[in-house]
Amino acid sequence: MQHWSSQLNRYLRVGQRRVEGWLDPFSARYIAELIFLLRESGRFGPCAEIGVHHGRLFILLHLASEDLSVAIDVFGNQHLNTDRSGRGDRKRFLENLVRWGGDPSRVAIIQKSSLEVAPEEILSAAGPISVFSVDGGHTAECALNDLKLAEATLHPGGVVVLDDFFNEVWPEVCVGAVQYFISGGRLKPFAVTPNKILLCDPDYNAFYRTTLRDRLRLYHDKDAELFGSPVSIMGVRRYGTFGLLKRRVAASPAGPLLKQLKTMFWRLA
């Protein structure tokens, strides 16, 4: 990850594994590459997350941004956490943020249920959001509400990262997302990574999907379709060192020749 500051590199290599939460290392890498692509294209600005917990993904977003980041969580108001999905801790979150090089003065904390947050509250705090992580309440009502909230505050060309869509323990997230898609939600999927689906305006689907697929081609599992939208399945299959080496060779200039030789060998065998 030579694109990044030493701070962010350190967090990707070490820090995000030491902050309590649920974030697959490949999904972290994919999101980091997405942010770099947004910066290259001049579309990267404020980030936001619903469901910060102890900051595992939020810190990554914050370290990559030079703008204000918005953290939305009930934190200590656990009576608002009706489905008991996670247990955010504001003190621990801020400690983790500082420990890994974050700047609390660039964080706007909204401590309440996202069901009570209006789009204007986010926009007035930070402006349009470039990357919006949705990992809050895991009921259908919360998932639907949070996707609508993210859509209403997203910068043109921005991306929403939805957590737990395929998680068997939280099926209502899938229900809420389906309700969003079939009720006319503007955003559509373009990628699936471990425990995440990434959404954007359809006009940007091909750009994000193909560019990130090419940059992380060793981890490209397959192409598929989700809710009528083409998606890349990335990093879901697990490969050891030998498996990744085979993929690296296959992706090299010698790959097609080796494939032909392999085919000839099996025909002669």
Image (spheres, rainbow, N blue to C red):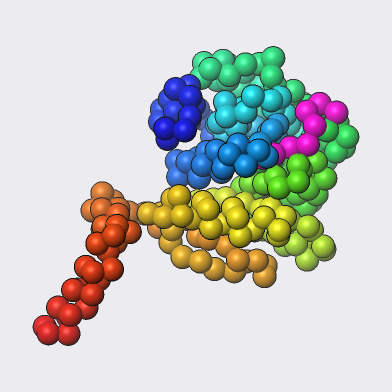
Query: Which residue is rendered at x = 14% and y = 78% of the image?
Result: 265
Quarter of the image for the N terminus: give it: top left
Residue segment shown in magenta: 124-131
In magenta stretch: residue 42: no
Closer to us: 86 or 177 = 177
Residue 111 is situated, as x and y percent measured from the top left of the image, at 77, 26
Residue 45 is situated, as x and y percent measured from the top left of the image, at 69, 33
Query: Which residue is rendered at x = 53% and y = 58% of the image?
Result: 210
In magenta stretch: residue 125: yes
Query: Which residue is rendered at x = 74% and y = 37% of the image?
Result: 129
Question: Looking at the image, can residue 116 be seen?
Answer: no
Residue 138 is situated, as x and y percent measured from the top left of the image, at 69, 47
Closer to us: 114 or 8 = 8
Quarter of the image for the C terminus: give it: bottom left
Asked which quadrant contains residue 15, the reply is top left
Closer to us: 45 or 226 = 45
Vertical order, 227 against 115 (above or below)? below
Query: Which residue is rendered at x = 69% and y = 14% of the image?
Result: 105
Closer to us: 218 or 204 = 204
Asked which quadrant contains residue 209, the reply is bottom right
Residue 229 is situated, as x and y percent measured from the top left of the image, at 65, 66
